Amino acid sequence: MRVNVTVNGEQRQADDVWEGESLLFVLRERLGLPGSKNACEQGECGSCTVYLDDVPVCACLVAAGQVQDREVRTVEGLADGDSLDPVQEAFVEAGAVQCGFCTPGLVVQAHDLLDRVPNPSDPEIREALAGNLCRCTGYEKILDAVRLAASRR
Amino acid sequence: MDFLRPETLAEALELKASRPDAVPIAGGTDVMVELNYDHRRPSALLDLTRVPELQQWSGGLRVGAGVPYVRIIDELGDQLPGLAMASRTVGSPQIRNRGTVGGNLGAASPAGDTHPVLLASDAVVEVASVRGTRMIPAAEFYLGVKRNALEPDELIVAVHLTPAQGPQQFSKVGTRNAMVIAVCSFAISLFPDENRVGAAVGSAAPTPRRALEAEQFLASALDFKAPKPLLDSVKREFGELVSRAASPIDDVRGSAAYRKHALAVMARRTLGWAWQELLDGERACA
């Protein structure tokens, strides 16, 4: 089937999409957007977190056909040209990125948190990021990054 | 595989009647896992996310099957505190943004987080087909492990719940707070005007189930009109009766013996919390 979807503000079209395919597969393999990462394929790890109509979701759990005529925003759509989003900058500065695999999902999820809650408490940050797994950092520097991004907004 | 995309409930029911093998999908948090892992290859997916009738609630209270957990937590927590508490324990924020009570009912996993609340709160499940509508009490909806009372041409349309008439509590045991399937869970609803409670266990039997003897015990042991502090003996007996209502198995998440023990603990604690809320309410009114 064909899927028409707005991705990062641009009207996109994917062809020969299998009806049981996930949004994540469409983004990575058909639209050339490999920022969202494929790890668990069951919503456990959060690495594929993207905005769907402004709500963060696991792209691996959205059927491709469900995004027809809807709006998706991926990690690639956060930066403004060459200038990173404040959340991305804070992740770099705080040392919240090690192997980097979980980073795109965490950045999108943290971005949404700060949009909804400009000055989150630590429990609020932990709760918001509870569905994003990181095996490198031990999370402390990720919490630092979110606090840093919040302080700059 | 076909991808069916109805835009009204009537259209969805027509499609389900002509394609009873089509698998309904809303939040996708269960269905997509099965597809991603090659556990299921249905001949069609029936996407319900564009059916407006399923995304709304009305009256007092009919909650559309496609309302995501996050909206129940944020917008219905005052009226349905027990359901909101259980919804808060589902998966992660990303999962709660997508997952629905309708999906919980459709999957009918014995470990589904909202089932004990629906049972303890006398919820009624509204299902529909081109043949008409059926209202199925939650207690009659769960038939076996991942089996429910739905006919092949039917869709889950809504859940009917009365706004809480008294304190409600929910408790769940898992290895951490987020992203866990319940080892076991428990819900209690107080109906002070009717001198009774609803109580139900999850993940501790082939289906979620009510703890009827425990409910009857409290109805006779408690005075809802002039509530006094709970006796330890009442809490203990209630916990024992709840534990006895379960018939758990040993599995990867926990042993049957642990589940029985944990249920008794959760029953005692949640009763304590709910009863305290009732006492505090009485004091505030006095």
Image (spheres, rainbow, N blue to C red):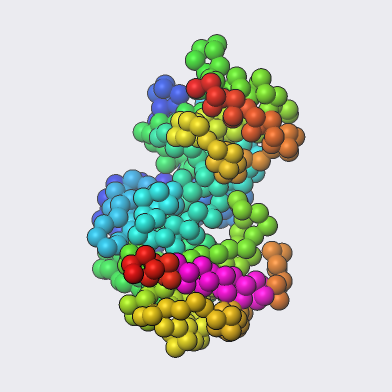
> Splitting the image into 4 quarters, where does residue B192 fall?
bottom left
Residue B274 lies within the magenta run: yes
The dominant secondary structure in magenta is: helix
**x%, y% of residue A1?**
43, 37
**Residue drawn 49% across and 15% down?**
A80
- Residue A19 percent across, percent down from the top left: 47, 43
Residue A9 against residue B241 in the figure, above or below: above
- Does the segment drawn in magenta span residue B202? no
Residue B27: x and y in percent read 45, 49
Of B10 and B269, nearer the camera is: B269
Residue in front for this viewpoint, B199 or A22: B199
Furthest toward the top, the residue is A82
| Residue B103 in view here | no
Left or right: residue B25 versus residue B205 is: left
In the image, taking residue B276 as reference, residue A97 lies left or right, namely right
Kindly indicate the quadrant of the structure image that contains residue B167.
bottom left
